């Protein structure tokens, strides 16, 4: 109880705290800008009209979309490179096995050869799917831009 009283006395003795963006504390400087005071929103160091804020938000949203699209492209490229590397490694191993004459191959080598062919086939299918998906995404972008265009 005494603590509450001492805090309230202490707070009353101090001058009121300044709050960031408080309307009462804002210095309106619209006379040199030719703007109506009601159209200005005061921020830390700048003043902007709501329309300007909306335009800036639209620009930021577009930039975000571009960055997300670029990130997607880079991820595709990384996946594509990794798949190509895996395919090349498997092909190299397969070439080494194919270089052995058929009569000298063991049953294990023949099985490994079949296994490698199946793995390469799966990786090629996966890469084809990835390329098709990227192509669909690339073709979809112009249609999005057309649908956003004002009519």
Image (cartoon, rainbow, N blue to C red):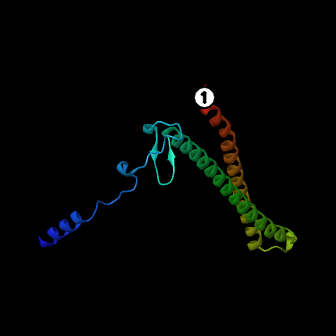
- Quadrant the N terminus occupies: bottom left
Q: Position of residue 99 (x, y in %)?
A: 87, 70
Q: Position of residue 43 (x, y in %)?
A: 46, 51
Q: Farthest residue in the left direction?
A: 1
Above-or-below relation of 13 to 125? below
Q: Farthest residue in the front direction?
A: 32
Left-right relation of 48 to 127: left
- 88 or 112: nearer the eye? 88
At 65% from the left and 32% from the top, the residue drawn is: 146
- Quadrant the C terminus occupies: top right
Q: Position of residue 74 (x, y in %)?
A: 68, 56
Above-or-below relation of 100 to 22? below
Left-right relation of 5 to 93: left
In the picture, residue 3 is in which quadrant?
bottom left
Q: Which residue is mark 1?
A: 150
Above-or-below relation of 33 to 45? above
For label 1, count other residues whose C-alpha is less than 10 Å away and answer few (under 14), some (14-19) or many (20+): few
- Secondary structure at badge 1 equals loop
Number of callouts: 1
- 100 or 6: nearer the eye? 6
At 69% from the left and 60% from the top, the residue drawn is: 78
Q: Position of residue 113 (x, y in %)?
A: 76, 67
- 72 or 49: nearer the eye? 49
Left-right relation of 40 to 135: left
At 44% from the left and 39% from the top, the residue drawn is: 37
């Amino acid at each position: 109880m005494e603590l509450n009283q001492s805090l309230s006395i202490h707070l009353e003795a101090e001058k009121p705290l300044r709050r960031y963006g408080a309307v009462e504390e804002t210095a309106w400087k619209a006379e040199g800008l030719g703007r109506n005071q009601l159209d200005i929103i005061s921020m830390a160091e700048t003043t902007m009209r709501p329309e300007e804020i909306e335009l800036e938000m639209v620009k930021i949203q577009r930039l975000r979309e571009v960055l997300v699209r670029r990130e997607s492209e880079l991820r595709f490229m990384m996946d594509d490179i990794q798949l190509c590397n895996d395919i090349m490694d498997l092909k190299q191993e397969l070439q080494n096995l194919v270089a052995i004459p058929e009569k000298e191959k063991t049953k294990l080598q023949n099985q490994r050869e079949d296994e490698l062919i199946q793995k390469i086939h799966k990786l090629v299918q996966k890469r084809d799917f990835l390329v098709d998906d990227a192509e669909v995404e690339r073709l979809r972008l112009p249609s999005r831009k057309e649908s956003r265009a004002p009519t």
